[in-house]
Amino acid sequence: MSSNSSVARYFDTMDYGPAPESDTDARQWLSRHAEGFGHFIGGRFTAASASAHFDTAEPATGQRLARIAQGSAQDVDAAVAAARGAQAAWMALGGHGRARHLYALARMVQRHARLLAVIEALDNGKPIRETRDLDVPLVVRHFYHHAGWAQLQEREFADQVPLGVIGQIIPWNFPLLMLAWKIAPALALGNTVVLKPAEFTPLSALLFAELAAEAGLPAGVLNVVTGDGATGAALVAHEGVDKIAFTGSTDVGRLIREATAGSGKSLTLELGGKSPFIVFDDADIDAAVEGVVDAIWFNQGQVCCAGSRLLLQEGIAADFIERLKRRMQSLRVGLPLDKAIDIGSLIDPSQLERVRSLVATGVREGAACYQPPGALPAGGSFFPPTLLTGVHPASTVTTEEIFGPVLVAMTFRTPDEAVALANNTRYGLAASVWSETIGLALGVAPQLQAGVVWVNATNLFDAGVGFGGYRESGYGREGGREGCYEYLKPRAWAGRKPRSAAAPAPAADEADKASATGALPTIDRTAKLFIGGKQVRPDGEQSQPVFSAAGHRLGEVGAGNRKDIRNAVAAARAAAGWSSATPHRRAQALYYLAENLSARSGEFAARLTSLTGIAACAAQAEVDAAVSRLFAYGAWADKYEGTVHVPPLRGVALATVEAIGVVGVVCPDEAPLLSFVSLLAPLLAMGNRTVVVPSERHPLIATDFYQVLETSDLPAGAVNLVTGPAAGLAQTLAEHDDVDALWAFGAKDLSRIAERLSIGNLKRTLVDHGLATDWHDGAAAEGPLFLRHATQVKNIWIPYGE
């Protein structure tokens, strides 16, 4: 035995030797498809309609891996047709039948775990240890967990029905895991799927589809169409798709939001991130250093929730950086199938060049760059673990998602400063907080604008715990009960019909003639806007007439404009105390509103009769229903709560329900009082601040209501009313980047405006696409249906024990 390979030498140096995982089975599977993969449609592989293909490469070597079909619009059409044809029978199979299929899929993944793990490592370039020990087990967990939801669907989601055909587009960083996140809940709840995997990494999806068919999944329930962005665009645009679920870049998410606007498609977006990793001076520093390794160098930093911004309290910063650099020196970069490496290859030379360019930009802007010594493997897209210090909050590397193994570090002095730095981003996906003082950690976590917060941990995921972001990190949740709702729609809304066209408003001259009956004119009264707790004149000093059902002029209201919306949003933003008020406090305010409205019920009923022409008894019924609805949301205010998840680890995850923030509301013309209250009350109950555009045709009912608001104990700015043309004001609200969500009910085009123009800050929208809601029907117009849209769920993970 030579001295270079002696056992004694290894004990002296403690070097790792190579420990390659065999790829024999994976290569054999690939060789069976050496002539090229087709699309998986209707339970079998089919040739691409245009016979177009492209090659994929191994990120770690650059060598050709497989020949993949390039999907066309015709291929997408065939896949959607197969999914549509299978959906009714799949839904009719029932929860137990679908549960058995998902259970079979989970067992299938377990039986082929090694093959799937190797294919994933070859296709993506990530270490086999990650695909074997993290990705594949989580895939199994998702199918088991959602088999349970399928079994319980008839009881737990009795008021919901499946959406139908789901188009799903997944990224290249977690190809197999993202597949499971997407298709497990969709299939469990009675939908069928057309999946478009990433152009770089389609292999695990094709393998999964092939194995699923062998496991007995009915033909057409799962379809896979491969291709580039054009294939994804065809899926997004297809009229036969009821929902698009997308995970990927924020820029592409904006394009999808714009493309689906007004189409009636449901949409969830899980987008980019620039997550903070906050370390306080009482943290376990060595544990936090290991947390950083997991946060940013897991999967080469190609993780949407990667902890890429390290925020250190000043007292420990120097010591922490020294320990971190020492730890970086032990990280091993190597070929993905080597079980002894920590960091594999980036996905592609283009991504490698992007990471290099951004690091160079950071250095030009003043950052100090540290990379541990050591050679990188030749032939692939490898980049070393990198630490940038001396960055400032506005630097490019601090604000832009790098999506590579690059960490930027800054310091802070106080918890308030830490929160300010953490929230200084347009994203809001995840955050980590490290402190041995649990009160400090749990005090900071609710202040962070992120959908997931890990306490003394990072990158924890589970099928039973929702995952998703705020702001430009997208909206919607994946996993848990909240993720199930993304693939369902309210049964009460499933049969809605287009609202009837309103009769044209009387012309001004006809109204004037109709009102010219008395010797003396009535005393003029122009209702003002209501902003910041005050009645204010509109900025443009313009008004518009309001007519009765009989054509008489009843008065005028202010015609609000862009500046009035700006002022109302500013007033709502300043009323942040309402969001931090206790649920009990909010409940009392809503009960008091109901009390004050009830005291003036006769006046409001008479106003409804004059505005809309409905009978006095019907008008009184609408007022009574509005009072009841305020009481209902007063009741819900302190009862619509989060839950405690118990994932399979030593710890819990607190699913906390939070207000969205500032929400714009555009009300319809029908049932002008009841629809106004039905949209306003759930938002107030959950702590949101509102900018409301009342019924354009019947605004006086809302301007009467601000007199009720003035006698309530709501803080100034919690409710702001801007009257005027609905379409124009909705456009301004949709474009306003300080508005966090927009609810728009009315004409179909109003929904399109709200969705299309909301892409600036990717605000959440709730629209009716011109479909009429029965506002007197509690199932359709009250309760959790609206409360879910009035809130966002933050999951705070709290591991415990040694």
Image (spheres, helix red, strand yellow):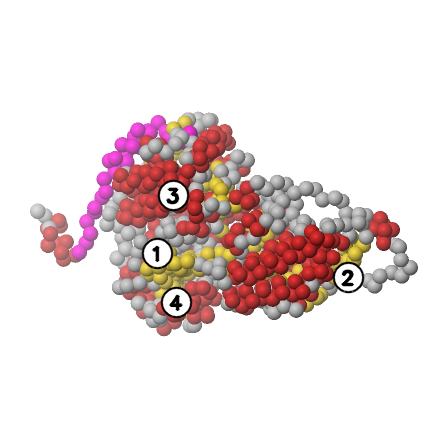
> What residue would you read off at disc 4?
441
* Circle 1 SS class: loop
Residue 536 x/y as whole percent: 71, 65
Q: Amino acid at mark 1?
A: Val
Residue type beneath disc 2: Thr
Nearest the eye: 241 or 694:
694
Gap between marks 1 and 4 measured at Cα: 19 Å
**Which of the two labelled residues, at mark 1 and mark 3, occupies the earlier sequence position?**
3
In the displayed structure, does residue 741 sit left or right of residue 62?
Answer: right
The mark closer to the camera, 3 or 2, is 3
Disc number lying in front (3 or 4) = 3
Q: Residue at x 67, y 65 (%)?
A: 599
Residue 526: mark: 2
**Reading the chain from its start, which is encountered first: label 3 or label 2?**
3
Q: Which residues are magenta?
A: 14-42
**Which is more N-terminal, label 2 or label 4?**
4
Residue beneath the point at 48% across and 66% down: 420
Instruction: Say if mark 3 contacts mark 2, CB within 8 Å.
Output: no
Q: Earlier in the sequence, mark 3 or mark 4?
A: 3
- Answer whether residue 201 is magenta in the image: no
Element at badge 3?
helix
Q: Measure how far apart labels 1 and 3 are at the Cα level.
A: 20 Å
Q: Position of residue 698 (x, y in %)?
A: 72, 53
Give x and y (percent) for residue 16.
20, 52
Q: Is residue 318 visible to the viewer in this orientation of the structure?
A: no
Q: Which mark is residue 646?
A: 1
- Mark in the foreground, 1 or 3: 3
Q: x, y percentage for residue 4?
A: 13, 50
Task: Provide the residue designation for mark 3.
Answer: 151
